[in-house]
Amino acid sequence: MSPLEGAQRAASQGPPEASSQVDPQASPPAAVEAVDVRRSYRVGSGQVDALRGVSVSIRPGDYVALIGPSGSGKSTLMHLLGLLDRPTSGQVLVAGRDTRTLDDDGLAELRNRTIGFVFQAFQLLARTTAVDNVALPLIYRGAGRRERRDRAVAALEAVGLGHRLDHRPAQLSGGEQQRVAIARALVGEPSLLLADEPTGNLDSVTGAEVMATLERLNRERGVAVMLVTHDRDVAARAGRQIRMRDGLVVDPATAAPVAWGPDS
Ligand SMILES: Nc1ncnc2c1ncn2[C@@H]1O[C@H](COP(=O)(O)OP(=O)(O)OP(=O)(O)O)[C@@H](O)[C@H]1O
Ligand SMILES: [Mg+2]
């Protein structure tokens, strides 16, 4: 199938129309969906085609592992799905909404309300306590001081850190720091959590704690989770795997390119 046919097929199957249908049986739109996205970077006088026509769909409540060799485009795709970057071409839909028409403020606002992002390197503010790190995203929503604190405390309790509210990052273990980062991603009650190698900087025991936290949030709160991992065991625990190679989604079993997600 050509990329154009792939995009058309995806669009005809895709959820944007579904959300406007009156059919009560209609399935809800994907939490996030990429339709034939490409992302190229200019480097010197050359160009790197990091994504070469990728279509994926993450449904509400999904638990998906994104796997593939180093340089295959996993982080690039995660950044597009997390609205941290824009594709060179193609479409990213969040809860059925086409994000191409949004300006940077509009993207940031949609991201703040719907998506939590967890990075390998935690990205916490070093001089700021756990509770204030977690409360930060709520400032951009205009929440008052009291509400920010209450919700940050609740998010830290949800990741088992209710007893570490006033610790700064350097006063926490690696696994605790990553759980603070998960609480920060969670505080806005997103429907989707994207995690790029969340256990990459952690030893196996601490990594297992972080994974257990993500799995519990998915199971108990129905938050859709997509995570990048190089760990086979972590990937095997996910409900579904998406494998990338050379900027394309490939079949997890055969590694042959697929024009559209394996389960569509
Ligand atoms: N800002 C950039 N400018 C130029 N090239 C880039 C940029 N970011 C990524 N690339 C290139 O795009 C390709 C995909 O990179 P990406 O970071 O998505 O890979 P990855 O699958 O996440 O790898 P890893 O498992 O090592 O994290 C790589 O060849 C990389 O060198
Ligand atoms: Mg990466």
Image (spheres, rainbow, N blue to C red):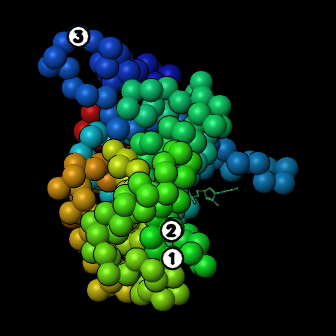
Residue drawn 20% across and 20% down? 26
Q: Residue furthest left?
A: 25
Q: Quadrant of the N terminus?
A: top left
- Asked whether the residues under the numbered discs 1 and 2 touch, taking CB atoms below 8 Å apart as contact, a structural biologist would say yes
* Between marks 1 and 3 in the image, the one whose residue lies nearer the viewer: 1
Above or below, comparing residue 262 to residue 137 in the picture: above
Q: Of callouts 1 and 3, which one flags the residue occurring earlier in the amino acid sequence?
A: 3
How many residues crowd mark 2 within 10 Å: few (<14), some (14–19), many (20+)?
Answer: many
Displayed quadrant of residue 86: top right
Q: Quadrant of the C terminus?
A: top left
Residue drawn 25% across and 28% down? 28
| 149 and 3: which is toward the camera | 149
Residue drawn 23% across and 10% down? 22
The residue where tag 3 is placed is: 22
Q: Amino acid at mark 2?
A: Asp
The residue where tag 2 is placed is: 132
Q: Amino acid at mark 1?
A: Thr
Place of residue 43 in the rendered image (x, y in percent of width and height, measured from the top left) = 78, 54
Place of residue 178 in the rendered image (x, y in percent of width and height, measured from the top left) = 42, 74
* Between marks 2 and 3 in the image, the one whose residue lies nearer the viewer: 2
- The reply, left or right, for residue 148 in relation to residue 88 is left
